[in-house]
Image: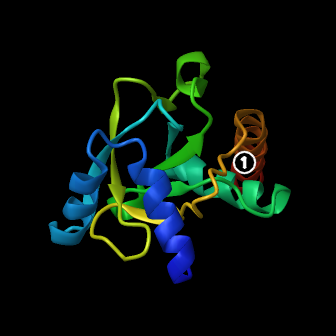
Amino acid sequence: MTGSETRAAIEWLTSVAPDPGACRWEWERNPQGIALLPAGKRWDVLILPGELGHPTLDVLTRLVDRPGPVLADFGESRMGFFVPPGTASRWIGTGIRGAGPGTWIVVPHPGRAAGGVRWLIPPDGSGTLTDAALLELAMHEAAGAAAQGGREGG
């Protein structure tokens, strides 16, 4: 990311914080480089198990030039896809958690490596989010490919 992209991403992310200055301070002072931000204002987050999230991201990056931001937790056992607000409350899917209004998520600084949680696709500051229907299509394709691979190997 360039310096201007990082600044734009910081502005976009902190715009949802109750105190944007405190959020920036946390990013600068917290040794892990993380802050808590509320979901449901500019984005919701759909949290997929890593075994589905990684192949879904692979499919998604073949379908669009730049999907919305994607987070991974330590060990990449879970991945969070940033989707339009309201998606989490409408989402029905086994094993998929939604973070919407009333939910806080751990967000690393967009321009630096952080311990634990990291960006697989950092925000670019433009507000780009992953379309929920496209994410669902990518999940189905990834799950179908995994099922095919399991049958061929067994």
Q: How many marks?
A: 1
Kind of residue at disc 1 = Ala
**Residue nearest the observer in this picture, 36 or 12:** 12
Could you tell me residue 135's position as x and y percent?
A: 71, 41
**Residue nearest the observer in this picture, 67 or 17:** 17
Could you tell me residue 120's position as x and y percent?
A: 53, 65
Would you say 35 lies left or right of 13 here?
left
What's the coloring here? rainbow
**Residue nearest the observer in this picture, 60 or 128:** 128
In the rendered view, would you say 152 is above or below 98?
A: below
Would you say 63 lies left or right of 4 here?
right
- Find disc 1 in the rendering and name its residue: 142
Q: Residue at x 74, y 47 (%)?
A: 151
Would you say 138 lies left or right of 125 here?
right
Q: Residue at x 82, y 61 (%)?
A: 62
Would you say 84 lies left or right of 102 here?
right
Density class for disc 1 (Cα within 10 Å; few <14, some 14-19, many ≥20) is: many
Q: Residue at x 36, y 54 (%)?
A: 107
Q: Residue at x 76, y 56 (%)?
A: 59
In the rendered view, would you say 73 is above or below 120?
A: above
Residue reaching furthest to the right: 63
In the rendered view, would you say 68 is above or below 102?
A: below
Where, quadrant-wise, is the N terminus in this rendering? Answer: bottom right
Could you tell me residue 32's position as x and y percent?
A: 21, 67
Residue 117's image quarter? bottom left
Could you tell me residue 61's position as x and y percent?
A: 75, 61
Disc 1 is placed on an element classified as helix
**Residue nearest the observer in this picture, 100 or 52:** 100
